[in-house]
Image (cartoon, coloured by chain):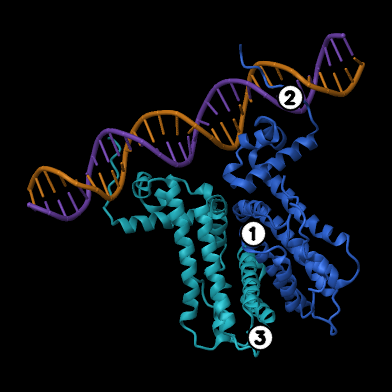
Chain colours: A blue, B cyan, C orange, D purple
DNA sequence: ATGGCTGTTATACGACTGCATAATTGCCCG
DNA sequence: CGGGCAATTATGCAGTCGTATAACAGCCAT
């Protein structure tokens, strides 16, 4: 009675790559880079370790692909938040901020994933360039929304840049601690503080869009697999 | 010609523990948790791996000690920033913020160290409690400084809490991106933006304390070993 | 000076890591 | 319905991980 060879079904290259990337992200998010071993990744993706080499050549390349997928996904979600809202500049800015300050963006696993990649980002010039691109893209979206506001006098570009940096920082900071210490903040508190702070920095009122206070609905989805 | 046994000198328990903790932090900061192996730690501390077990029982315990030392050190530096300044509330707040937004606090290795520990913090309730304590201590310092400002009408406690959360978030966010993408910001830009933003959130002026704009001095020290 | 305590080093072990290569088998095409 | 290619699995290997234990040696007490 020899141990039987594991049965399997063939799948498309796209599916396999996606499954491996998703498994990698999930493991890094939960246990850090050291938890994302080739064996653990393969097990979660439902395959054997050899496939990683087959589709990505090396674990390192899979890691890079997973990071690329991460930053691309984060960019998309910003645009998604603007899809359903109207044309009022203040409302659009408020929607953008609110989307960044509640689940699934605010999520302990998302921060874990981000932190897990930090060292690789710092040591790999290629990944660092991707990070910078992603950061600037997000900030530029923010700056464009800010520029669209009606604030009487026209705003110089240099001031717009500083405002975007500041607003981005508020959102980042709230996202960070809100994700790690989620129990320390009440429902909707992050969104309310974020809208009030950005409004104060820009000299406008953003808190009169009550539709952005999160409703007490059921558990939300996560952006992570 | 047998390989000779390595010569050594005895040292105090305190020195050895400090050296091992410093080596651990340096390695985590530079290469993440996976770089902090017992052999690498011992090599950097100038001893052999056995000493880790001798002084800390296990690598895990050393890791915890290193994290404790980190958060304790970060708490202290906040108070240090307030040591040299006068009694003017606005000046004290500005000094506190400025100290958090320039080296040695703003430093790629510091962020790396912080991120390297994130997963252990999330999975270890003991470390999570330490993180929360440290975060709240910093935020309470901030809130106290804010409460000390002279802003006409008295401020309700609940509003003070929200203001402290928001100001803390700005500082965190600027610290984060300023450390990772230091080349994207000009000298003193972070401090200037931080002071302006916090001032806007609180409705006061903090940018008229020019002594907090970093002078163009030589390379600064780091908080890391 | 010299025993002896203990701080320190040396060595060994099992588990796990990423990777390379060989062996299989599911499935498309004829 | 069966040949054959490629997707997938299985196996093996050298290196490194953390830890346990034994051997050594620096330094204090006498």
Residue at x-position 72% and y-position 48%: A224
Labels 1 and 2 touching (C-beta < 8 A) = no
Relative image position of residue A124 (x, y in whole percent): 63, 52
Q: Looking at the picture, does residue C28 appear above or below residue B79?
A: above
Q: Looking at the picture, does residue A55 appear above or below residue D29?
A: above
Distance, label 1 to label 2, CA atoms, is 41 Å
Report crowding for label 3: few under 14, some 14 to 19, many 20 or more residues within 10 A (C-alpha). Answer: some
Residue at x-position 71% and y-position 55%: A130
Residue wearing tag 2: A8
Residue wearing tag 1: A182
Q: Quadrant of residue A170?
A: bottom right
Distance, label 3 to label 1, CA atoms, is 30 Å
* Left/right of residue C2 with respect to residue A165 in the rendered view: left
Q: Chain of mark 2?
A: A
Q: Secondary structure at mark 1?
A: helix
* Left/right of residue C27 with respect to residue C13 in the rendered view: right
Q: Looking at the picture, does residue B97 appear above or below residue B57?
A: below
Q: Taking the image as drawn, is residue A109 in sight?
A: yes
Relative image position of residue B19 (x, y in whole percent): 38, 57
Residue wearing tag 3: B204
Labels 2 and 3 touching (C-beta < 8 A) = no
């Amino acid at each position: 009675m020899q141990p039987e060879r594991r049965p399997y079904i063939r799948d498309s290259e796209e599916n396999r790559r996606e499954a491996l990337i998703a498994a990698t992200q999930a493991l890094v998010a939960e246990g850090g880079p050291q938890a994302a071993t080739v064996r653990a990744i393969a097990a979660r993706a439902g395959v054997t370790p050899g496939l990683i080499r087959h589709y990505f050549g090396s674990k390192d390349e899979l890691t890079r692909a997973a990071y690329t997928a991460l930053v691309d996904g984060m960019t998309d979600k910003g645009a998604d938040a603007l899809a359903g809202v109207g044309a009022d500049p203040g409302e659009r800015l408020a929607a953008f901020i609110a989307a960044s300050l509640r689940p699934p963006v605010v999520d302990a696993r998302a921060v874990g994933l981000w932190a897990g990649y930090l060292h690789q980002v710092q040591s790999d010039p290629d990944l660092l360039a991707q990070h910078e691109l992603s950061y600037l893209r997000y900030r530029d979206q923010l700056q464009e929304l800010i520029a669209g506001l009606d604030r009487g006098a026209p705003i110089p570009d240099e001031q717009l840049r500083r405002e975007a940096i500041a607003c981005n920082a508020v959102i980042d900071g709230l996202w960070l601690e809100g994700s790690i210490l989620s129990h320390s903040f009440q429902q909707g508190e992050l969104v309310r503080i974020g809208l009030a702070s950005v409004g104060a920095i820009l000299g406008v009122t953003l808190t009169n869009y009550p539709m952005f206070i999160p409703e007490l609905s059921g558990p939300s989805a996560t952006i992570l697999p």
